[in-house]
Image (cartoon, rainbow, N blue to C red):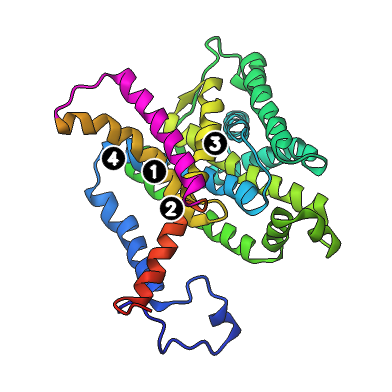
Amino acid sequence: MFYRENGQYKTTYAADQQMLPILQDRVFMAGLLVVAFVAVPFFASDYLFLSLLIPFLILTLAAIGLNLLVGYCGQISIGHAAFMAVGAYAAYNIALRIPQLNFLVVLVLAGLIAAAVGMLFGVPSLRIKGLYLAVATLAAQFFTDWLFARVKWFTDYASSGSVSTAPIVMFGWTIDTPVKKYCFLLAVLIVFTLIAKNLVRGHIGRAWMAMRDMDVAAEVIGIRPVYAKLSAFAVSSFYVGVAGALWGFMHLGSWEPLAFNLTLSLNLLFMIIIGGMGSLLGSYFGAAFIVMLPILLNQLPTLLGVPISTAMISHLELMIFGALIVFFLIVEPHGLARLWAVGKEKLRLWPFPH
């Protein structure tokens, strides 16, 4: 009853093409942003920031990047943690060797380097697809694991093989507390989400979706596969590279090459499968699910008074991940985002049965 479009007329092209055409959606989004920027920093604890909110924001950015490639362009990748590693090590070396650069410039440069590497490993997509392309992207994962572990220049010749970052200072503002990190990451995520939304609504996004649905037909109507596929790899790797830099600087602080292993790549893939491929909102849902599930599994036995070992909890986590992936692939291939859309459609008709 409260979610109706009656009387909301569009009299201009700009009004008809806006991201949130329904007034209720715009009010809800404005309220959500006020809560995120104003209420959460005042009421959330440091534990909530460090264990839940900061990882959620960074992984959402990485999931959006992977979703642009897999969900919108249809190019399967199971090695995107490699591009996160490229972004993290690129940002570390740029900040180390050119300390006078602003951190935002460091992020952009790290993303561009990751985009170049992503395009390099995306070249096989011009000839192969499906499982063969997935194996080609898996090669990127193994190659970067070897590169950053063996070539000591990337770690500034550290004997332990790990690197540590200094506190981030930007425009005289030191980002050294969980609240400051959260606000900065939230602003970055919103900006990148808006950019991604406009990309997928424009001619670039339509070219990606045409390649996803039927690449032969897309080529017949004038879409160049080279441009569409490589641009998808470049934009996706840019997003994931920036997320990797933020993961290293904002969340980890210090890391080693194993921090960006195959498990992280698979988790990113699980996020977009559970959240919904081809949906930016699904990236948010999937990242929230992946971040919250281990915490809930750790806290639930204590709340229920059932003693479960840590090893058992880790096994349950893997079992639940696998079961949910199979469930969503069979029952709802479009993930949690589709369930959200169905709920909104039902709300438009409620309380009427038609």
Mark yes or no: residue 266 visible.
yes
Tell me where residue 116 appears, x and y as whole percent. 73, 40
Q: Quadrant location of the C terminus?
A: bottom left
Task: Pick whichever, 294 or 173, lies toward us.
Answer: 294
Q: Residue at x 29, y 77 (%)?
A: 351
Q: State how far apart marks 3 and 4 are (Cα).
A: 21 Å
* Mark 3 or 4, nearer chain start: 4
Against 79, residue 36 (above or below) is below
Q: State how far apart marks 1 and 4 are (Cα).
A: 15 Å
Label 1, secondary structure: give it. Answer: helix
Numbered mark located on residue 289 in the image:
1
Amino acid type indicated by mark 2: Leu
Badge 3: residue crowd in 10 Å (few <14, some 14–19, many ≥20): many
How many numbered marks, from 0 up?
Answer: 4
| 203 with respect to 338 (left or right) | right
Q: Which residue is mark 3?
A: 244
Label 4, secondary structure: give it. Answer: helix
Label pair 3/1, CB-CB below 8 angstroms: no
Q: Quadrant location of the N terminus?
A: bottom left
Q: Which residues are magenta?
A: 305-332
Amino acid type indicated by mark 4: Leu
| 350 with respect to 262 (left or right) | left
Against 208, residue 349 (above or below) is below
Tell me where residue 150 appears, x and y as whole percent. 65, 14
